[in-house]
Image: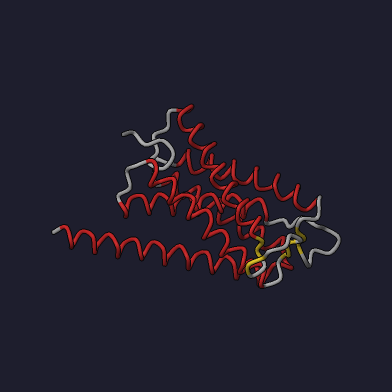
Amino acid sequence: MKTAIKISSKTETGKILAKSLLKLILAGFFIGIFHSFDAWVGLVLALYLVYTLVKRWRLHADDKYVYATGALIGGFLGVCCEGWGIYFNHWEYHDLGQRSFPYWLPFAWALAFTFVYQLEKDLFRSLGLQGTGEKIILTLLVAMIFPTIGEIITIQLGVWTYAWPYQVFGVPLLAIFLLVVFHTGVNYLMVLTCRRMGWENEVFNPSN
């Protein structure tokens, strides 16, 4: 019985990882191939973000406020970080004409939160994680691996380049570290927000 449960759990976890990786790859290729038409890319990402939010509301999901708040915080802080990096020439976006800031960036950062959050939520369930330490380790791994894969795809397709050295397929080690800091930082803000608002959430504010 226990063996069957473990096999089922591994199968479910594998499906979650495969589905998430496929989504990430498709999004990376979409942005990479069409990045020179950044206004249209921004429109598509904005519509998809609205679609996911409306879907959450129509399904009366218990985490709809968490989902929307996290997307807003992730989008805002992502734009702030992008403005800092572009201003100080730490990275540069290409094929934008006279502009240096793509229209799609705010929506990409908002969707990055929804992607990471949903992946963490699904993995917590499939793996049956209960301990805080286990959840933190998984959160750090997700924040390190998946955003980095997304950046590798878009960088290789010519969307932007980093000025920092010590790169892995175009992504500097410093950038990987900062991605982890960013996503875990947003998670921490969501923990504080959920506690403040009294929102029970299995990722940020579990009831048990």
Q: Residue at x 30, y 65 (%)?
A: 11
Question: From this viewpoint, which residue is outermost toward the front?
Answer: 166
Residue 140 located left or right of residue 3: right
Q: Residue at x 60, y 53 (%)?
A: 177
Question: From this viewpoint, which residue is outermost toward the left?
Answer: 1
Q: Nearer the viewer, residue 3 or 27?
A: 3
Provide residue 181's location: percent of width, then percent of height. Answer: 59, 46
Residue 66 located left or right of residue 71: left
Q: How many marks?
A: 0
Q: Nearer the viewer, residue 141 or 87?
A: 141
Q: Residue at x 86, y 60 (%)?
A: 98
Residue 205 located left or right of residue 155: left
Name the image quarter holding residue 41. Answer: bottom right
> In this rendering, is residue 19 above or below 202?
below
Position of the N terminus by quadrant:
bottom left
Question: From this viewpoint, which residue is outermost toward the right?
Answer: 98
Provide residue 95's location: percent of width, then percent of height. Answer: 78, 67
Position of the C terminus by quadrant:
top left
Provide residue 68's location: percent of width, then percent of height. Answer: 52, 42
Name the image quarter holding residue 150. Answer: bottom right
Please, which colouring scheme is shown?
secondary structure
Q: Residue at x 59, y 55 (%)?
A: 47
> In this rendering, is residue 156 above or below 189?
below
Q: Nearer the viewer, residue 2 or 97?
A: 2
Provide residue 122's location: percent of width, then percent of height. Answer: 38, 53
Q: Nearer the viewer, residue 2 or 103?
A: 2
